[in-house]
Image (spheres, helix red, strand yellow):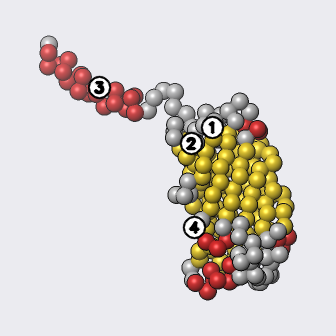
Amino acid sequence: MIAPRTLSLKAALPLVLLAVALPADAKAPSLADAAGSYSIASSSRIQFNVGQTGGGGIAGNFAKFSGKFRIDGGNVSRSSVEFTLYPESVRARERRIEDFLRSSAVFDAANYQTVTFRSTSVTQTGPDRATVEGALTARGKTRKERFAVTLTDWNKGSISFTIRGSIRRAPYGMDVGTPIYSNVVEFDMDIKGMRR
């Protein structure tokens, strides 16, 4: 009598462990659930790419940035984002490309030490997605830009997003090299926020 019951428990143990590891009410991350105020962590990744006719192009990233954001759990549209990039910190595959990007032809980092973004509206497009619009200022010029945001992970202390956006260079006076190089900069960002 004891042996069959023991075998039955052994057979059931993997199912019990699976049920504990995957609770019945598990769900995808939700913007409303992740409500709070966060500072952007230095472990975030800010990459960009400018395509080139025939393939290739310029790819780079920013080593220095700062910012904060707030997610309003009661009404996501009342959320806000502030973000600053430091053009002097731009990195690329070659030093000469970095120097070119920092020069007066592109970011003009000597005269414009920051690129800033401040949201003016947040529109939730799904449980874990939103579109953020706001004022982007670069080289003294300000325009409305839009980014697509997807929540990828969160816990009590931190939160992670992917952010995508396409920005035209010409309105900011950075269209050097067109049409050989695309007038559009593609941003690909993995942002981590630490709860404040």
Badge 4 amino acid: Ala
Residue shown at 51% from the left, 31% from the top: 26
Marks 1 and 2, how far apart at CA: 7 Å
Marking on residue 36 = 1
Q: Position of residue 11 (x, y in %)?
A: 26, 27
Residue shown at 14% from the left, 15% from the top: 2
Residue shown at 74% from the left, 33% from the top: 75
Helix, strand or loop for disc 1: strand
Badge 3 amino acid: Ala
Q: Which residue is mark 2?
A: 195
Residue 124 seen anywhere in this rendered image of the structure: no
Q: Which residue is mark 4?
A: 63
Q: Position of residue 93 (x, y in %)?
A: 56, 79
In this rendering, which labeled residue sits more in front, label 2 or label 3?
2
Please report whichever mark, 2 or 3, sits nearer to the chain's N-terminal start.
3
In this rendering, which labeled residue sits more in front, label 1 or label 3?
1
Q: Position of residue 60 (x, y in %)?
A: 61, 72
Marks 2 and 3, how far apart at CA: 40 Å
Q: Mark 1 packing: few (<14 Cα in 10 Å), some, or many (20+)?
A: many
Judging depth in this view, the residue of 12 and 92 nearest the camera is 92
Badge 1 amino acid: Gly
Please report whichever mark, 2 or 4, sits nearer to the chain's N-terminal start.
4
Q: Which residue is mark 3?
A: 12
